[in-house]
Amino acid sequence: MVHNPTVSTVQTTEFSKLSAQSAPFVYFDRVVTAGVHHGTIQLELGASTLVPTPDSKVASVHVITAHLRCNPSAAAELRKAIDNVLLLLAPTKGESS
């Protein structure tokens, strides 16, 4: 159980204000495949979407939503950030899941 996760000291970096406006939001349901190429981590992110069919029904289609590439250091930072965020979803003391 997580009582109250603490946030470690964060080193701040200044980002261009314009970059925030053009950065995409990436949604994914799962990691479709993963690998390493010449030391670069490669993750293909996928999601399901619904599309209408000619017979007025709906079909579920799987699509690649992003090709994520990073070095091992950045992958470790991403894993740490995801692990820390997942702790926020854990039930707190006295709370049921």
Image (cartoon, rainbow, N blue to C red):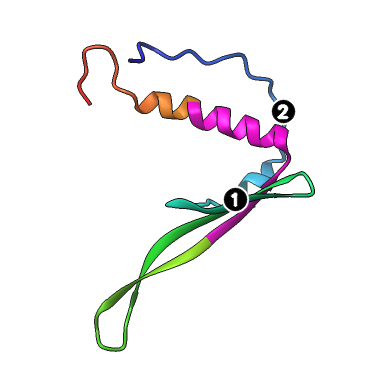
Report the amino acid beneath label 2: Thr
Q: Which residue is mark 2?
A: 13
Q: Residue at coordinates 57% horizontally, 14% vertically from top-left?
A: 8
The stretch drawn in magenta includes residue 76: yes
Q: Which residue is mark 1?
A: 34
Q: Is residue 86 above or below residue 39?
A: above
Q: Is residue 71 above or below residue 42?
A: above
Dot 1 surroundings within 10 Å: few (below 14), some, or many (20 or more)?
few
Q: Main secondary structure of the magenta part?
A: helix
The answer to whether any part of residue 28 appears in the image is no
Residue 55, by quadrant, is bottom left
Q: Position of residue 66 (x, y in %)?
A: 58, 57
Q: Position of residue 33 (x, y in %)?
A: 55, 54
Q: Is residue 45 left or right of residue 88?
A: right
Q: Is residue 44 left or right of residue 17?
A: left
Which of labels 2 and 1 is toward the front? 1
* Residue range highlighted in magenta: 65-83
